[in-house]
Amino acid sequence: MHRDAPKSGFFDLPTEEQIASFCPDDGPCCTENRFQVDITGVPKSAWNMSATAVFVQSFVAAHPEYKKKGTAVRDAWTTHFARLKEIYNEQQRGGGNTVKKVKHRRRERKLQIYYRRLRVAKHYEGLQESVEHVIRELGVDGMSSDESDHESGRGEATYYIVRKPWRTAKLTAYLHVLDALHLKMRYGGEWDKSSGSWPHYRTSSLRDSQRPPPTHLPRNFYSDEWYYSRTSFAQNALYASSVLYNFSHPKQILR
């Protein structure tokens, strides 16, 4: 079946005729100004290997500091390509709208967590400045997402927390204290519920988030094990701040 060459993000999709007639000996499959990848093909196809080489050359030309890190740039592109291919396949299966709705609901839940933790900071004297700093540094994308076993919205759903492997355990524990303080705000000491909707039930899972971490965070927001498992290219791309944060809450708050 003939396929036209529609645009997809910042690159074009080549036609089947272009892919079939491509010969690496004749030169690159595309150029920097008209970057083309075969989203339906495998990463190591002749076309996609050529496109990868074009990407690496263009990236290194724009960022000379990575001149000796071509392998890391290529690996980063290959990982990104795999994600683009996954999104494309979801859309082709006709699940685009469903996927968007699910992602929207997850995003809304992350927003609720973000603002809930900020409200805790405002409620407890002695927390506001320190907690607001952490939460605003993390942003909404730094909050843990979750997956519902009832994404359709029917029944009493359980939400399974998707872990963020990049986040240090001390930071995660710090955020969990805020969640516990939120429950205390809502129920008081006698489980007398305040106004508002009931908090949904979240439980841990073994699944790790595949989303990239926020950048420009203080270095000790990132797990040492995770950070040092990255390539130097990936570490530099985080632009981690040298300012370190003390993850502790005032003792009077924890009583």
Image: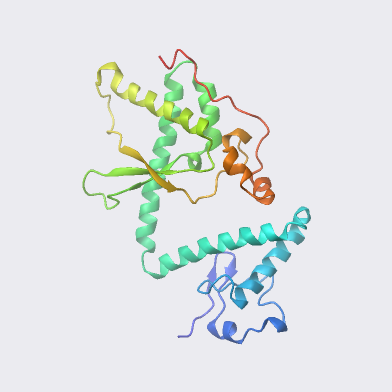
Question: Horizontal placement of 235 versus 67: left or right?
Answer: left
Q: Residue furthest left?
A: 155
- For residue 215, say whether it is visible: no
Total numbered labels placed on residues in the image: 0
Give percent across and percent down for residue 32. Answer: 69, 69
Q: How is the image coloured?
A: rainbow
Q: Residue furthest top?
A: 252
Query: 172 or 128, which is in the foreground?
Result: 172
Give percent across and percent down for residue 62. Answer: 75, 58
- For residue 109, say whether it is visible: yes
Name the residue at 66% across, 84% down: 23
Name the residue at 50% across, 40% down: 142
Residue 95 sits in quarter: bottom left
Give percent across and percent down for residue 51. Answer: 64, 71
Query: 132 or 57, which is in the foreground?
Result: 57
Give percent across and percent down for residue 100. Answer: 39, 56
Question: Horizontal placement of 35 versus 42: left or right?
Answer: right
Q: Is residue 81 above or below residue 218?
A: below
Which image quadrant: the C terminus?
top left
Q: Is residue 213 above or below residue 193?
A: below
Name the residue at 28% across, 24% down: 194
